[in-house]
Image: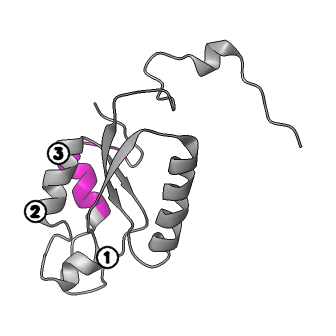
């Protein structure tokens, strides 16, 4: 199978990141829970192979945070990383059933003013 050739108009879009970009882009990265770690490893391999100039900062969200006593599932250091990088890539997040736990996904969306797939600058 041959590689798909994209027209120059697609590959030279303004603001497009390319392997030749010199500025690194910070991003908070939460692997998530369950199969999230397997997905996160694959995503990181894909991003590295693409040459994306990312500075990935791992953050803990969800089950591990709840078990560490963080009632929102989003520790303060994760909020700081998200605010610092202005970007979050996350895997599937578990919200424990019962016990009054708030959904991390809903907390993130409401706190950041985002839709489920938002991209805010």
Task: Determine the CA span between mark 2 and mark 3.
Answer: 11 Å
- Cβ–Cβ below 8 Å for labels 2 and 1? no
Tell me: 97 left or right of 1: left
Tell me: 10 left or right of 21: right
Give the dominant element type of the magenta stretch: helix, strand or loop: helix
Q: Out of 38 and 66, give the one closest to the viewer.
A: 38
Which residue position is annotated with label 1? 95
Disc 1 is placed on an element classified as loop
**Callout 3 environment at 10 Å: few (<14), some (14 to 19), or many (20+)?**
some
Say which label, 1 or 3, has the lower sequence index: 3
Which residue position is annotated with label 3? 83
Q: Quadrant of residue 117?
A: top left
Tell me: 94 left or right of 18: left
Q: Quadrant of residue 78?
A: bottom left
- Cβ–Cβ below 8 Å for labels 2 and 3? no
Please name the residue shown 48% across and 40% down the image: 52
Please name the residue shown 19% across and 66% down the image: 74
Please name the residue shown 57% across and 42% down the image: 50
Task: Determine the CA span between mark 2 and mark 1.
Answer: 18 Å
Please tell me whether mark 1 or mark 3 is closer to you in this view. Answer: 3
Assess whether residue 107 is covered by the magenta stretch.
yes
**Callout 2 environment at 10 Å: few (<14), some (14 to 19), or many (20+)?**
few
Say which label, 2 or 1, has the lower sequence index: 2
Instruction: Please state, as top left, top right, bottom left or bottom right, where the C terminus lies in the image.
Output: top left
Looking at the rendering, the stretch of residues picked out in magenta corresponds to 105-115
Q: Quadrant of residue 21?
A: top left
Which residue position is annotated with label 2? 76
> Residue 34 at x, y = what percent?
45, 79
Q: Out of 91 and 118, give the one closest to the viewer.
A: 91
Task: Determine the CA span between mark 1 and mark 3.
Answer: 22 Å
């Amino acid at each position: 199978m041959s590689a798909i050739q994209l027209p120059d108009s697609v590959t030279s879009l303004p603001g497009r990141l390319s392997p030749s970009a010199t500025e690194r882009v910070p991003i908070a990265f939460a692997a998530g829970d369950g199969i999230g770690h397997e997905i996160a490893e694959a995503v990181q391999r894909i991003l590295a192979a693409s040459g994306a100039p990312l500075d990935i900062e791992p953050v803990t969200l969800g089950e591990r945070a709840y078990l560490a006593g963080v009632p929102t599932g989003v520790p303060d250091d994760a909020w700081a990383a998200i605010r610092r990088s202005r970007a979050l890539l996350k895997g599937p997040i578990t919200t424990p059933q019962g016990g009054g736990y708030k959904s991390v996904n809903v907390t993130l969306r409401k706190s950041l003013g985002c839709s489920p797939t938002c991209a805010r600058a």
